[in-house]
Image (cartoon, rainbow, N blue to C red):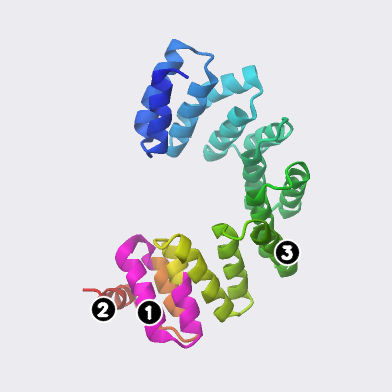
Amino acid sequence: MTPVLEQAVLALRRRNPEEAARLADTALKADRSNLVAVEILGSALIELQKPEQALPALMKAARRSGDPVIEDLLARALFATGQTTEAIDQWRQATERRPPHPPAFLELSGALCAAGRYGEALGVLDQALGLMPKADGLRIALGHIHLKLNDRARARSAFEHVRAAAPGRRDAIVALAQLATIEGDYAEAAGLYRQALAKQPDDPPSRISLGKCLLELGRRDEGEAIIRRAIHDAPSFAPLAISALAGASHGRLFLRPSAALAFLRSALS
């Protein structure tokens, strides 16, 4: 890898897609066949919400290379520009490559779910897990589709499978907490959210969900304090917090969003 591309990779990791795109474009002008440069450029432009600008380079590289990473990025760019059918076809092509590229299966299943094609999405993930039985992220996604279909037993089986294989895996813990909430076991859900927050204390959705569980358990002061603190630290999650307060059986009902925001801020001002 050239020094310019090394800098581009570092910029992408540091969440500076503008710099990553500039450096990758420079590298690509020097070597039009450099797949690493195309990958970085495509990733950066998609992150910058400029997928249409990524399409020419990705299309050319995908035709030339048959690389599943490039094909996956091309499909993501197509999907982001509203070309759903073309994106799904591209993801299907990427999933046929060997060795398999897990993100292509994950993105394809997500696109199929978005189109309401849940049976096909399950089939994609079943195929992927047949090829990669230890791909826990794909199994978590499988569980979430079962949850969308209200097949709680299969969802729990998928989540528990991952948790048994990797007890510290946070997404499995959160998924089980969500399932426990749906089933009305707020004590179990609260315990699981606490475990998840021990691993990532600054996660606003988990903090708000924990607060809602405590409200459901009748622990209003504690639940409201957690939700208020979450919004103090992450104001953009105020709508989720208001929904949690209003939706809990022991929560609060506000006639106006402004009243809800005033309540959330009152103890922290």
Residue placed farthest to the top in the image?
A: 30
Q: Are marks 2 and 1 in contact (CB under 8 Å)?
A: yes
Q: Is residue 268 left or right of residue 90?
A: left
Say which residue appears at 31% left-offset and 63% top-offset: 233
Q: Is residue 56 left or right of residue 236?
A: right
* Mark 3: secondary structure: helix
Would you place residue 121 above or below residue 46 in this image? below
Instruction: Look at label 1 and name its amino acid.
Output: Glu
Instruction: Look at label 3 and name its amino acid.
Output: Ser
Residue 224: image tag: 1
Q: Main secondary structure of the magenta part?
A: helix
Numbered range of the magenta stretch: 209-238
Provide residue 13's location: percent of width, then percent of height. 42, 37
Q: Which mark is first along the chain, 3 or 1? A: 3
In front: 138, or 109?
Answer: 138
Quadrant in the rendering for residue 118: bottom right
In front: 227, or 121?
Answer: 227
Mark 1 and mark 3: Cα distance apart in space: 32 Å
In front: 151, or 217?
Answer: 217
- Give the number of the mark in front: 1 or 3: 3
Residue 267: image tag: 2
Instruction: Examine the rendering and report whether any part of residue 247 can be seen.
Output: no
Instruction: Look at label 2 and name its amino acid.
Output: Ala
